[in-house]
Amino acid sequence: MDFLRTLSLKKRFIIGVTITSIFPLFLVLGLIAYQNHKMYKKDLAETAEIMSDMLAANIAPALLFGDADAAMDAFVILVGNPHVSAAIAYDNNNNVIADYPAGSSSASVLSRTVNRSRSSSQKFFEITKPVMLYGNQVGTIWLQFKLDFLYERLRQYTEVFMLSFLVSLLFAIFLIVLIQRFFEKPIMLLMEAAQQVTEERNYRKRIRHNRKDEIGTLLNAFNNMMQVIEDRDKQLLEHSENLEQIIQMRTEEINHRANYDALTELPNRYLLLDRLKHSITSLKRHGGKLALLYLDLDRFKIVNDNLGHMVGDKLLIAVAKRLVGVLREEDTVSRLGGDEFVILMENIEKPEDVENVARLIIKSLKKPFDIMGHALHISTSVGIALYPDDGEDENTLMKHADLSMYQAKKTGNGHYMFYRPDFDAESRRRLGMETDLRNAICNDEFMLVFQPLHETISGDLAGFEALLRWDRKGNGIVMPDQFLSIAEEIGFMKNLEEWVVENVCKFLSESDREITKDLCFSINLTPACLKDSGFVKSMISIVTEYGINPEQLEIEITEETFLEATEAVYDRLNTLKELGLSIAIDDFGTGYSSLSYLRNYPANTLKIDGCFIKDISTDRSSRGIVSSTISLGRSLGMQLVAEGVETDEQLEFLQINHCHLVQGNYFSQPLTVDEVYDYILSYNKKIGFKKKNNYST
């Protein structure tokens, strides 16, 4: 079996068909030979029977009378018969009467003939027969026939059989070869086709044929299978191509998202730094300069908070388009996030070229933007860093451009500034201030001072404005204008102003109520706190906790805060007003309020900024502004407070124009908590006024 497994299908087919076809033929021919041999042997037996009967009939008288000569004469019929080899006649006493040929009888022959009617061996066939006469046995005859002729015939049959077998075998082999070729050819074609498909991946391969049999069905099945595979291959190819396109699109999309701002489609920080790095590498090799312009939009937060993020996003998109429109194609305009943009200018010849571009950018962005029906006015602050003067790597240039932008912003909106080395010191100072500011409350470094407010005509003490000071360890007293903007940027204002509210309330709760009950204490609040709903709740909780009469408290909010206020801020102001707190508009006249806005403000008091008060002695326009503001406030039923009063002339002018309250160094410098008590005790001492009318409005 193992041998057969090593043979090819072709050889196994030939062997199998040969065996299955020759074996039946061999079996049939063998059966025919066997039957012929059996038939001849039977014929011999019948012939021997007939001949023995004839001999018995002829030899019976001779045996009866014991006549040997007559018995020999009876054997005459055996003469010439080639099949008879011997014959013996016996009497009843088993005495040999006659034998043929003479002398053939022997003891061995006699012993074999006793009690045997018929026997055979490989060479002879023997028959023993009783001789009967008138019903009585008179003797016995024994005949021996040779089987040579039978074997001769068997040999002849065998030769014929072998010849027939060989002829049949050859014919069978011939037929097998024909059949094998008949079946092998399509199978070989099928095998070659399968191998070709495997090697070449050619699924268009087909086997052409016109067969209608099972082989044809197999070939058709192969062709159908190849058709299915080809269709599947086409589908897979199409799917693969589609998948490759999708992957390519997704890859491009991911790369785009990784390198471009999703809102403005401008390069983002990653792509900007990559281009900046390559530009610096090229300039180090070939020489040259580049500039980095860091832009921050002024007043963008006001737009975003009041008009919503949708308007803010559309404004950023419009700004991006306007920036791209005023710059060269080779310049890179990128958005870092929020309202910050950075411009990379390569191949610049001198700083003046960058300065001209900065002016052009500022001028371009000052033009109003029409966004969803709103005419929006913004400006930008620009910081500029140059390579290689201000840094030799991308991170240093970005840092210095950012510092320059911050310094430009400090000078006012719509300015630009080139980097200077001293900006680093300013940055370190600012960072140190941020760190110290976060720890100032825990270290008990903040303190309150109080600026008195007096009635303009009587001079009576009306109240105090609580002012914040920072006793910074190792640096002395720090004024609010030096740290409040930093506190707001780092999100510290809520903590700071809660501290102010709590300490004012604590002061009132610990003081003699009879002394302070008629005095009003003002607290300054920033826009950030009013935008936080939690701060207003916290303020109400503090006032309630210390048991302070809300009517003794007034919150001061800048005019700009009202301009930027959302509906939620107005709701919070009204909540405080309904609770009993007064609301004052601080620094009035420095903003851009219109009369229609002023009419709708939930304010009780207008505080005229000191910048107008200081010049009323010499500047006619200042006198006009102050007198008009007082008239406007009184007509709206609001209380007027003049800030920064320092001279008799200023006080007299305010008396003549019926300003309600005044405050400033004319009366007192800001007082510490301990000094406030002494000052309150002397509040009823009138200040002498010289009533003069030396001013014309």
Image (cartoon, rainbow, N blue to C red):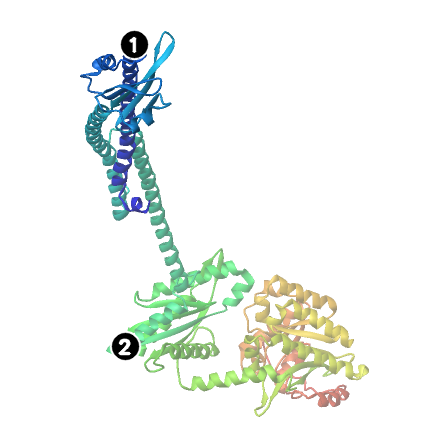
Image location (x, y in percent) of residue 243: 37, 50
Image location (x, y in percent) of residue 180: 24, 34
Identify the image quadrant of the C terminus: bottom right
Tally of numbered tags? 2
Secondary structure, mark 2, is helix
* Amino acid type indicated by mark 2: Leu
Quarter residue 118 falls in = top left
Secondary structure, mark 1, is helix
Q: Nearer the viewer, residue 560 or 324?
A: 324
How far is disc 2 from disc 1 in space, using C-alphas?
Answer: 155 Å
Of circles 2 and 1, which is in front?
1
Tag of residue 604 = none
Q: Say few, some or many: other residues with alpha carbon within 10 Å of mark 2 (under 14 / 14 to 19 / 20 or more).
A: some
Evaluate if marks 2 and 1 touch, with contact meaning CB atoms under 8 Å apart: no
Note whether residue 291 is visible. yes
* Amino acid type indicated by mark 1: Pro
Which of the two labelled residues, at mark 2 and mark 1, occupies the earlier sequence position? Answer: 1
Tag of residue 61 = 1
Q: Is residue 271 left or right of residue 188?
A: right
As drawn, 469 above or below 22: below
As drawn, 335 above or below 483: above
Image location (x, y in percent) of residue 616: 57, 81
Q: Is residue 415 left or right of residue 619?
A: left
Q: Nearer the viewer, residue 351 or 176?
A: 176
Q: Is residue 260 left or right of residue 149?
A: right
Q: Which residue is mark 2?
A: 283
The residue sitting at the top extreme is 134
Quarter residue 185 falls in = top left
Q: Say few, some or many: other residues with alpha carbon within 10 Å of mark 1 (under 14 / 14 to 19 / 20 or more).
A: some
Q: Nearer the viewer, residue 421 or 350?
A: 421
Identify the image quadrant of the N terminus: top left
Tell me the residue at 35%/63% (across/down). Answer: 325
